[in-house]
Image (tube, rainbow, N blue to C red):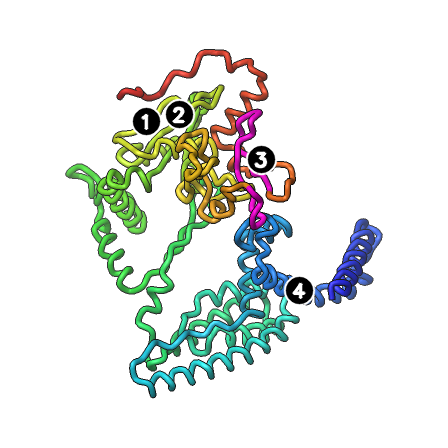
Amino acid sequence: MSATLDQAVNQIVAGLRSLAEVMQDPDSLHFASTHIPMERLHACLPLLSNADTAFAFLCDRDGAGALVGANHPVEYLTRSLGLSRREAFSLLEQGKRLFGEPEVPQPDDSEDEAERECKEREAQARRKAAREAQERARKAAQQANAEKKRIITNELKHLNEHADPGYEELLAQALEAAEQHTAEELRKFVRDLVKRANKRGRDYNGKKDPLAAWKKRGIWLGEPDADGGSHAKVYLDAASRAKLEACLAAGDHRGSNMEGDDAADRDKRLKHQRRFDQLMNVLDRYGDATAKARGGAGTVVLTLTLEDLMGADEYTEFTTNTSVSLTPLDVVRLGLAGDSFVLQLDSATGVPLSLGRTRLASVEQKMVLLAMQSVCAWNGCTKPGVELEAHHLESYLSGGLTSIENLVLLCREHHMCNNDHKDGAGNKGYFDRDPANGDVHYYPANGDPPRHTSTYQYRNSPGQRVAHKARSRHGGDRNRPQDPALFDPDG
């Protein structure tokens, strides 16, 4: 089977190279002579998409993450196939749903034996129907391109656990209809299928799941746009919506959250802006009340050098421990009070100089590491500081100290990819410092050369920028007096 696969891939690669050569000079071609072959090519692309889906299933089933020293197969797909994490997760979900065991809700335990047997028979019938639907879905998937598969996967995420029909049946219906619909039409078609199935859904007691909306609760934050703002999407169950509406209602009237007897007359904000300001007011109060008890967890941390500060204008962006950077105006609006910190690094050496704060904190070490990294130290990972954990390069159990020199920040997923014993077990490598320059490197288990993190956000963190400049100066400015501290270390 492996030889057949190699032969098939070799033929495809040779054909694509030949196609690329022919299309290299479009001026020598005409639409009339090219559109039919290109239409044939695109008609076959769903077959490649199906092969990708099956391969993703193999990656998940056989632990492909171990090949790159990780636990999750998404790391293999992103590193070896060049997929984005979003694409990789979507492909893994498709593979699981098309080739894995169908997921059918398990019946609740019952003390009555007859009732328990009845529920089990019903569950078996659902499993049989799900497998039959899955087989239909696999056949239909051969005609749906990758984009339509992604649309279907994304829309089916909104399906409830006890929807009627279940996931496999809706997947089959959606894939069977994919060829007759454009991508935009297909999205609306699947959305309607999900809505009707959720409405008809009942659990094994013949009742609608009362927690269906609560199980789907969540908040999703979009990427910052050109203005630095982001869209947020929130799904609320009824009780949570009632609580949120009650909190926001206090900010509905003009002049809310403003001082002065004439606040209402001066308030030119629209209603949705007043509600937003009220939400920020609620968050500020929560931060003031709880941040001290948490020892600084959940706070906003801003990192900068004196050089950054002196050269700043209204558009300068400073790195934070969140997924966004802040301009000076954002910093002023944030207030840097109560639950916010500023960590200053020397602009020549990168040595932490001073910490601005309004209360005691137990997270100074993590702030220093954040300034040196901004994101997870695993190459390609962009998870921000609020999601990172301090990792001991020399494990704590083997005597490693909890010191800046022995710590690096990793996200939870990649923290689990480190082999503390450094013996190559599980094909997992380890993080350590380069004795020559002190940089943190990842040392693969197979003996390949150590990898320095080249993630864009990591390289542009204040500490890495300073370290790069210091190395490029060959000791020039490193001998100058240290930057003056912005904050009194004894204050």
* C-alpha separation, residue under disc 3 versus residue under disc 2: 24 Å
Taking 421 as reference, is 52 left or right?
Answer: right
Question: Who's the residue at 46% across and 78% down the image?
Answer: 165
* Res. 452 mark: 3
Q: Position of residue 193 (x, y in %)?
A: 47, 74
Task: Confirm or deny contact between disc 4 and disc 2 (CB under 8 A).
Answer: no
Q: Residues within 10 Å of mark 3 (few under 14, many from 20)?
A: some
* Res. 51 mark: 4
**Which quadrant of the view contains residue 388?**
top left
* C-alpha separation, residue under disc 1 versus residue under disc 4: 55 Å
Magenta-highlighted residues: 423-444
Let me know if residue 164 is in the magenta part: no
Mark nearer the N terminus (3 vs 2) = 2
Image quadrant holding the C terminus, namely top left
Mark nearer the N terminus (1 vs 3) = 1
Taking 66 as reference, is 301 left or right?
Answer: left
Task: Confirm or deny contact between disc 1 and disc 2 (CB under 8 A).
Answer: yes
Question: Who's the residue at 52% across and 25% down the image?
Answer: 467
Q: Which residue is mark 2?
A: 344
Q: Hey, what amino acid is under mark 3?
A: His
Let me know if residue 430 is in the magenta part: yes
Question: Who's the residue at 28% across and 33% down the image?
Answer: 337
